[in-house]
Image (spheres, rainbow, N blue to C red):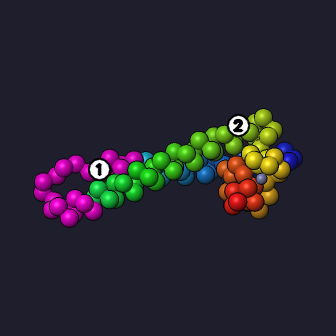
Amino acid sequence: MNAEKLEKYRVLLEELAARVREDLVGTSEQAGIVELDTAIGRLARMDAMQGQQMALELKRRQEQQLLRIDRALKAIAKGSYGICGRCRKPIADGRLSIQPDAVMCLKCAGG
Ligand SMILES: [Zn+2]
């Protein structure tokens, strides 16, 4: 991959990281909200707890994505970016443009 392309993906990755970090702030708040507030009814509390579970799951995924982005940025620095972690073939540009933190080619990720 040439330097121009690497720079493009580096920018994409940093934009993505900024966005995910921003989302993570909101998700972390949501994940921490449910207190046993007796003012709300049992059903409302169950709703809130369900929402909290979903927020926790989302938070976990966002944190993993940040780790992936971080690894991708390091791979750019090392010159190993865009190589499938399984079959070692280059990951298609189309895929990386949409998902710059992809660690596997479409074929390996799908199968
Ligand atoms: Zn592959």
> Is any atom of residue 84 visible in this view?
yes
Q: Which residues are magenta?
A: 26-47
The residue tagged with tag 1: helix, strand or loop? loop
Identify the residue shown where x is 26% and y is 51%: 34
Label 2 environment density (alpha carbons within 10 Å; few <14, some 14–19, many ≥20): some
Disc 2: which residue: 74
Where residue 28 sits: x, y (%)? 39, 47
- State the image quarter where residue 72 is shown: top right
Residue extending farthest front: 111
Q: Is mark 2 within 8 Å of ligand 1?
A: no
Identify the residue shown where x is 83% and y is 51%: 90
- Quadrant of the drawing holding the C terminus: bottom right
Where residue 79 sits: x, y (%)? 81, 38
Residue extending farthest right: 2
Identify the residue shown where x is 34% and y is 59%: 51
Magenta-colored stretch includes residue 85: no
Where residue 31 sits: x, y (%)? 36, 50
Where residue 38 sits: x, y (%)? 12, 54
The residue tagged with tag 2: helix, strand or loop? helix
Q: Which mark is residue 33?
A: 1
Left or right: 59 with respect to 108?
left
Magenta-colored stretch includes residue 29: yes
Q: Which of marks 2 and 1 precedes in the sequence?
A: 1
Q: Which mark is residue 18?
A: none
Left or right: 33 with respect to 90?
left
